[in-house]
Image: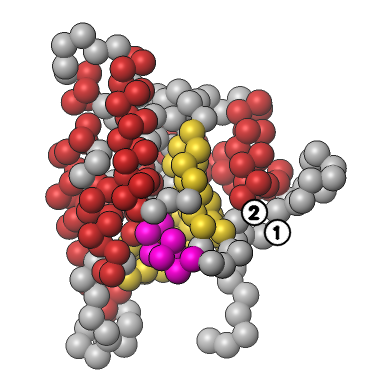
Amino acid sequence: MSDKTALVISAHAADFVWRCGGAIALHQEQGINVTVLCLSYGERGESAKLWKQEGMSLQKVKDARHAEAEAAAEALGVHDLATLDLGDYPLDFSRENKMKIVDVIRKVQPAFMLSHSQYDPYNTDHMNTMNAVLECRMIAQAWGHNPGETVLGAPQLYLFEPHQTEQMGWKPDTFLDITQVWDKKRAAIECMEGQEHLWEYYTRVAQQRANHFKRNSGGQSGGRDCKYAEGFQSIFPRTVDTL
């Protein structure tokens, strides 16, 4: 088991599954402990199927979504699933709530982080999460914030793929082959019963990104095969010894 850790910050309970479930499962298999922090359950805006049921209440929806997230996390092998219940539509990014996120970042001390795209006019919870993550990353690096705690280094922040990529200005510069853990991601996807309409959509996304992986790994015919992949956009420069 590696000492290396990673942190996924997900606006809603299902986001980590669709957008980086493969990365989670793959790194867990490599011995890298991945913590997933869900800021909300997606109870208001992303639970339409549940709200159409008779006798539904806000707490019942939260409970159902939490159970789905826990089942998905287990399918992916998540090291730790943390939830903050900040509400959704809109998420509540008060100063107090941002400090809760900072506390998680400092506790995990991630080598890299994953979160949402910078722009999302269809779901402002997503882009507000990304802005909050950048701010909280900065605060976690500050020696003057809660002196005596271990400060954060400089983890890369990868932005995972938004739902309507072309409208978001999201441009992937990293493709991750998740073929060997696809069965785990698909199992996690099927845990999200409240959003069954997205199951096949995100299967097709993974197949499309596999095509991009192959195209950029030595050529379409010369590169190694890949059946499923995820794309990410990195924010910070990478420091390397060789190219």
Q: Amino acid at mark 2?
A: Gln
- Which quadrant of the structure image shows residue 88? top left
From the image, tell me which residue sits under label 2: 109
The percent coordinates of residue 150 (x first, y second) are 77, 51
Find the magenta span and give its range: 24-31
- Which quadrant of the structure image shows residue 237? bottom right
Q: Which mark is residue 153?
A: 1
Residue 121 appears anywhere in the view: no
The percent coordinates of residue 22 (x first, y second) are 34, 59
Q: Amino acid at mark 1?
A: Gly
Q: Nearer the viewer, residue 76 or 21?
A: 76
**On screen, residue 230 above or below 15:** below
Q: Is 16 within the magenta?
A: no
Rendered residue at 17%/38% (across/down): 196
Rendered residue at 36%/69% (across/down): 175
**On screen, residue 92 above or below 142:** above
Q: Nearer the viewer, residue 93 or 36?
A: 36
**On screen, residue 156 above or below 35:** below
The percent coordinates of residue 4 (x first, y second) are 58, 64
Report if the CB atoms under discs 2 and 1 are less than 8 Å apart: yes
Residue placed furthest toward the top: 55
